[in-house]
Image (cartoon, rainbow, N blue to C red):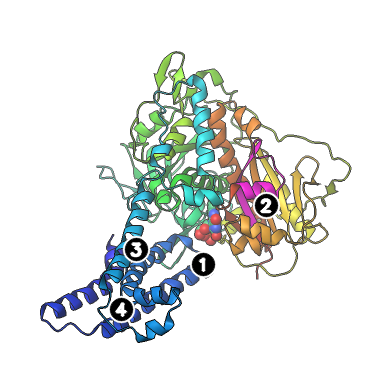
Amino acid sequence: MDKLLWVLLPIVLAAVAVGVAAWRGRLPPRPVLNVAFSLLLLAYLLVTAGLGIFWVANQHLPVFDWHYVFGYALLVLVVVHLGFNLRAVVFHLRRRPAVLAAAPARGRRPWLGAFGVLGLLAAAGGGYVIGLRHGRTELRIDTAAGPGGVALPLAVVERFHEFSAHTRSGVLRRAPGADWGDPPPPFKPARPVPWPPVALPAARRAQAPGAGFDVRALADVLWHTAGVSARSGGIHFRTSPSSGALFATELYVLVLDVPGMPAGLWHYDVPGQALQPLAAPAAGAGLPGLGALPPGSRALLVATALFRRSGHKYRDRTYRYVLGDLGHALENLRAVAQAAGVRATLLQAFDEAQIAAALGIDEADEGVLAAVLLQDPAASALPALDSAAWQPAVGAVGGAAVGAEHAATPLGITDAIHRATSLRTRTAPACGHAALAWQAAPRQAGWQALPVASRRAGDPLALIARRRSVRRYAAAPLPLADLAALLAAMAQPGPLLSAAVRIDVLAARVAGLAALAWRYHPAAQALEPRTRPADDLSRRARAAGLDQDVIGDAAAVLVLSIDRAAWAADPAGAARGYRHAFIEAGLAGERVYLEAGARGLGVCAVGAFYDDEVAALVGGDPGREWVVHLAAVGVPA
Ligand SMILES: Cc1cc2nc3c(=O)[nH]c(=O)nc-3n(C[C@H](O)[C@H](O)[C@H](O)COP(=O)(O)O)c2cc1C
């Protein structure tokens, strides 16, 4: 709001000056006022255009706020300008230039100008009011009292996905269904508690032989997952990519057995590189809502999302972005944990409500999204997941209505989809895990064999510390060996949360590969042609990618879709499978960043695209597979 006031200040001052002049009976003549307001209009037009050009060139779309605020101011000035000049415009449109030239400067038909100005104000005001109202009513999903029984969570997922899809017609038809308010600060302030925080050692930017998994290694894991690795233009850039650089993810740690760090429940204070206690440090303390943790467990990390951080920009598509962001961050977590000699397991089932209560957070604002167990590699693997011990958090299950905890929340469909993909348990099951594997397809005639990928694993700590999104690519084609390595890296080490992710390649400029859409088959290390060759693949990809240059200029665009049948068969439940599949796509997306970094290539994750157009480009069946994520790849310019 203060932004709006500052931007409108020159207009307000000009209006006050005119008002004072009129009150003193010294109102300047109409042509003088016209020139003054025209100059103001020109200044705002230049700033608005300049901001648009700057941010598009700079590609940091989150700061677009300034652009639209100037847009509002511009609208005000256009109305004033037309008030002065509408009559001339009307005369001109009626092709009566001679009359126009002869028309006296003021006073012939004052009602015409007033009428025009009022009409414009009514149109702008009406558009604003309709924009606020439109869409709200159709968005509400009453998850507490639906008739669908156990199928209700899946129905919410379908509705959410369809509603949050970008389509050209949807841009006009839909409006945000929630009031997102002002964005929360980029970092969560520390809670007032009587226990002191623990400063963590500075993170190492390269792998170093350590003393096992101790406080230094924990500090490395946390920083490489969510730490600040660069500052520019007032934005804190993190070690993981994040849509709009908004970074909604928050990290909490249950420390069980980490030398140098007191056991207990902590919040990761990112700017302070410290752990803030949430409760009195206590050895042996567990976390409800997870099930019993097995011996050899060293720490448990819980990731949440502060929905409003992303929501004020991404609105009803927020849940997709926070899951995509999280997947990228968790892959960094996994890679650094592995380098530190511990096994990281993404837990498939946990009770969000119980964990949120233990963390002292309100799930209506900050949803619990993932939990990762860090164990000694020698510790025995988790037992099989007991699916029967978990039930969806919404819907009538076994005759009892559950999930009414947040019956009325302001975040609309974001809250609904979070609850639909959440779980509850009435028992205290063992912490289990179901094994997953990619779908295997034998290589077929007509498929393009890929060179055996020679991956350049590199040092994950160094790669993550210097990782950045790259949006400018040279015209040079992408070598086929590099594409093969990126694809192989995406599929390694196999699915961690979901086997539903499918990978296609829009090969605009890949040496030795026709320009068409290819389906990647990891087990066969081969590409299956999906569409006909197209000379205008880049142009169509750019259009489908919301006209983003990063897509149009990329040598190849990796397109990640989720197979509906596969995620609906998730051992933790169909709706939860949707969340898992999104996070899995993010994990694969981050592997592209790291492998590309090791090979000197540029990558940019892209979550903003027309869903239907990208699906058509890769030749997919939108009823069977939903496109969820893109990664633009190329040789950096
Ligand atoms: C899920 C996801 C979606 C993204 N979508 C876009 C996008 O549509 N367009 C874009 O230019 N960048 C996109 N990005 C990249 C972010 O803008 C970028 O990560 C952020 O500005 C931080 O910069 P960094 O990656 O260099 O640290 C996306 C990143 C993620 C993780």
Find residue 222 and report its horizontal and vertical position in percent.
48, 48
Q: Nearer the viewer, residue 427 or 605?
A: 605
Residue beneath disc 1:
56
Q: Residue 143, which numbered label? A: none
Q: Earlier in the sequence, mark 1 or mark 3?
A: 1
Instruction: Tell me if mark 3 has few (under 14), some (14-19) or many (20+) residues whose alpha carbon lies within 10 angstroms of its own.
Output: some
* Image depth: mark 4 or mark 1 in front: 4
Is residue 630 rendered magenta in the image? yes
Q: Quadrant of the N terminus?
A: bottom left
What is the count of numbered marks? Answer: 4
Q: Which residues are magenta?
A: 612-632
Please tell me whether mark 4 sits on a helix, a strand or a loop: helix
Q: Earlier in the sequence, mark 2 or mark 3?
A: 3
Q: Calculate the distance from the C-alpha at mark 4 to the C-alpha at mark 1.
A: 28 Å
Please tell me whether mark 1 sits on a helix, a strand or a loop: helix
Disc 4 residue type (three-letter): Phe
Note whether residue 597 is visible.
Answer: no
Is residue 194 rendered magenta in the image? no
Disc 3 residue type (three-letter): Leu
Please tell me whether mark 2 sits on a helix, a strand or a loop: strand
Instruction: Tell me if mark 1 has few (under 14), some (14-19) or many (20+) residues whose alpha carbon lies within 10 angstroms of its own.
Output: some
* Image depth: mark 4 or mark 3 in front: 3
Residue beneath disc 3:
120
Residue beneath disc 2:
558
Q: Quadrant of residue 437?
A: top right
Residue beneath disc 4:
37
Residue that lies at the very extreme toward the top in this rendered image: 399
Disc 2 residue type (three-letter): Leu
Find residue 571 and report its horizontal and vertical position in percent.
59, 25
The answer to whether 212 is drawn above or below residue 67 in the figure is above
Please give the name of the residue rendered at 56% of the width and 61% of the height, measured from the top-left corner: 468
Q: Nearer the viewer, residue 329 or 260?
A: 329
